[in-house]
Image (cartoon, rainbow, N blue to C red):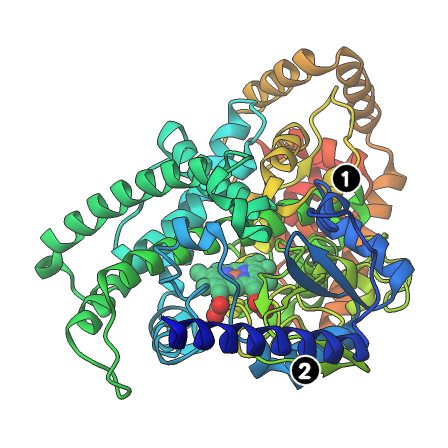
Amino acid sequence: MVIFREFLLWGISWLCLYIGFSFIFRKNKKLPPGPRGWPVLGCLPLLGSMPHVNLTNLSKKYGPIVYLKLGTSEMVVANTPAAAKAFLKTLDINFCSRPRIAGATHLAYNMQDVAWVPYGKRWKMMRKLCNLHMLGGKALDEWQHVRVAEMGHMLPSILTHSQKGQTVNLPDLLNVYTANIFGQIILSKRIFESEGEEANQFKDMVVELLTTGGYFNVGDYIPSIAWMDLQGIERRMKKLAVRFDDMLNILITEHQATTKKRAAPDFLDIMMSNRNNSDADGMKLSDENIKALILDLLTAGTDTSSSVIEWTLAELLQNPNLLKHAQKEMDCVIGVGRRLKESDIPKLPYLIAICKEGFRKHPSTPLSLPRISTQACEVGGYYVPKGVRLTVNIWGIGRDDQVWENPLEFNPDRFLGSKIDPRGNDFNLIPFGAGRRICVGVRMGITMVEYTLGSLIHAFDWEIPLGSVPAPIAPDELIKYDMASAKALMLIMLSISDNVRPHVRKVEKPKEAWDKLETIYEAKNQMKILHLQSKLHTLSMRSDEKVEEFLHHVDELRSKLLALGEMVDDKILIAITLRALPSQFRVFIMTLNVSKQTVTFKELVNFLQ
Ligand code: HEM
């Protein structure tokens, strides 16, 4: 008994000495600056409902690296490109794992997915599989046909909406489109045949996952009270995990029943074979790894790309000249007789610049996924203890006025002729994070945004519905995980005009088309009908000056293209010129176009003269 007491005293003394020394040691080290915060909660209340915005404001006061005590946990925030580089490049290996949080426990099968699994052999095995068979350069090319086929479903669906005079619920369409792409790559299955109830359920589940996973859950910062689940977040997560697990079980069972029918293996087939065979490091995938990976790839892939596409299109709607510029570029390079192909993209610098600007201003993950320090280290002259969480303020870096001129302006020109690239090497633009744990879907994400946005603006004229007040892009400030509200706003904003472009345009009789136009406008705005009618009337007087002016534009464009060695068909030239011309020509061409699939140069001249 006496021996035990002495042993206990000895142990306690050592513990006190250890705590005392660590305290003194840390006291002598300079932590990064930051606000003091409150007892118990620390700085948690300062994060508010828009942590990326509040953290950006804090960095203006405290500098590029801010230290925050959040409950009993500690966090450092990197707010500038240099700070991000110091953590994600110089000290990458020290910050390669992620902290344990409720979301990763409940919604990622206890951190068994590629996004949350601790850095090590299992993570490497999963990353390698994703890169080799789904998301890396070669795999991306191999799955291109799926993206093309899904675009072939989405564009006509938009056209149908337009023909019925309906506004387009773009977020829902994109949800169906992206989920079906990933569904086919992973499970050889179009998850949704069309937009609607079923698609909405999936979207709701994804949004719920991102919302609950993205909340600042108090229990993650004060583990001793986590069991109380004061905000009810963990309850929601557990319920959602059951729903996802049910869905995954059904999908996997269906998939196994059709293995023999598949001509080529899909990603789940590859994963199943890695469940049975070990890799070079002796690692095998567990059932949890497989389900967690499917969930990761289905969810991470769907909402991220589509949110960038929606925001960027919304920006273009507020800056119609930029939209026109992009359309003009595509008309020149692709023409109007066919859809955009992925191989066209390198020839479309303006489209690429628009997408980069979208990634800069509207990164779908404003605060990067958290990392944690495995060892104490020094960054920018500050001491960062072991076990401190790191968050990179991607949103703040994209709007830093020390880095970007007029950062709030949506200006793709800033990227023209610039080599800045979002793939994790230029720390001024890191929408996908950087370092070893950079987004595994970076190539796919960029391709999806460029190809999808490009196709949408090449195929249709988009406009804000008549009669609705153009909404400012205020939800900008919304936290990513609250994207649902931002999307609701998009629904009001996005509609396509009736002026659908030739390669998806349906042949209609002029009278019917005009009647339909009237019905649409009548419902929206009586004034607009009168306005259109008077414009048409003016045009029908066919002033010779207008004809000359128009033909002059066509000729000018032809010579410019010839100088570039491009021979372009007359009807394409006309369509391009019409796009570039003031709106009265648009209205006029609608009356002409609707009766034909395309307008010949001769017909146009006859009509005008
Ligand atoms: C516009 C599209 C996308 C954006 C902006 C984006 C952004 C991000 C960011 C910021 C991270 C955290 C990186 C870090 O810790 O430094 C991340 C991680 C990740 N992303 Fe993406 N992502 C996109 C598309 C995708 C796609 C298409 C997929 C897969 C289908 C995907 C799967 C993942 C996964 C699995 C991780 C975790 C990687 C790891 O921990 O090793 N993402 N993404």
List x then y, in percent, for residue 374.
55, 77
Give the residue pinned by disc 2.
377
Using a 10 Å C-alpha cutoff, classify the residue at mark 1 as few (fewer than 14 neighbours), some (14 to 19) or many (20 or more).
some
List x then y, in percent, for residue 396.
78, 59
The verdict on label 1 being within 8 Å of ligand 1 is no
Q: Inspect the image, locate mark 2, and give the three-letter code of the amino acid beneath it.
A: Cys
Name the foreground residue: 345 vs 374: 374
Q: Quadrant of the C terminus?
A: top right
Q: What residue is shown at x 77% (from left), y 31% (from top)?
A: 471
- 315 relative to 132, above or below: above
Disc 2 secondary structure class: strand
Name the foreground residue: 323 vs 106: 106
Mark 2 vs mark 1: which is more N-terminal? 2
Using a 10 Å C-alpha cutoff, classify the residue at mark 2 as few (fewer than 14 neighbours), some (14 to 19) or many (20 or more).
some
- 185 relative to 465, above or below: below
Q: Which label belongs to residue 473?
A: 1
